[in-house]
Image (cartoon, rainbow, N blue to C red):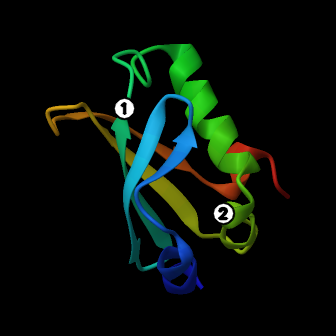
């Protein structure tokens, strides 16, 4: 199911106003997303982290795999392609029972 979800994601595409998705790949029961931060503070604040989690939990493309127990990990890169952080989202984090 994770592989099918990854294959349906087109890149590049906007995840939200602060990030652009540049790659999606399945890794077992995890969907690994690589995203470019369009603003320097996209993930470096608590608000940015919460926004990333909330956006992922609400994204229709990820709802099914999250409900079935898969996780979504988003690795964020700056405009120079340097790793600036990551967010892991699971159904528990989203509050799905």
At x 52% / y 45%, what residue is drawn? Answer: 14
Q: Position of residue 67 (x, y in %)?
A: 76, 68
Determine whether 30 is above or below 47 in the image.
below
Q: Position of residue 78 (x, y in %)?
A: 25, 31
C-alpha distance separating marks 2 and 1: 20 Å
Classify residue 71 as left or right of residue 12: right
User: Under tag 1, what secondary structure?
Assistant: strand
Quarter of the image where the N terminus is located = bottom right
The residue carrying mark 2 is: 62
Classify residue 65 as left or right of residue 6: right
Quadrant housing residue 16: top right
Whichever of labels 2 and 1 marks the residue nearer the N terminus, that label is 1
The residue carrying mark 1 is: 37
Within 10 Å of disc 1 (Cα), the crowding (few <14, some 14-19, many 20+) is many
User: Under tag 2, what secondary structure?
Assistant: helix
At x 49% / y 47%, what residue is drawn? Answer: 88
Determine whether 33 is above or below 41 in the image.
below
At x 40% / y 56%, what residue is drawn? Answer: 12
Disc on res. 76: none
Quarter of the image where the C terminus is located = bottom right
Outermost residue to the right = 97
């Amino acid at each position: 199911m994770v592989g099918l979800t990854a294959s349906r994601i087109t890149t590049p595409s906007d995840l939200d106003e602060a990030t652009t998705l540049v790659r999606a790949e399945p890794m077992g029961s995890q969907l690994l997303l690589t995203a470019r931060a369009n603003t320097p503070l996209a993930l470096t604040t608590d608000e940015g982290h919460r926004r990333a989690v909330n956006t992922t939990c609400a994204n229709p493309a990820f709802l099914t795999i999250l409900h079935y127990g898969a996780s979504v990990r988003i690795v964020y890169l700056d405009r120079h392609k340097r790793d600036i952080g990551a967010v892991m989202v699971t159904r528990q984090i989203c509050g799905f029972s």
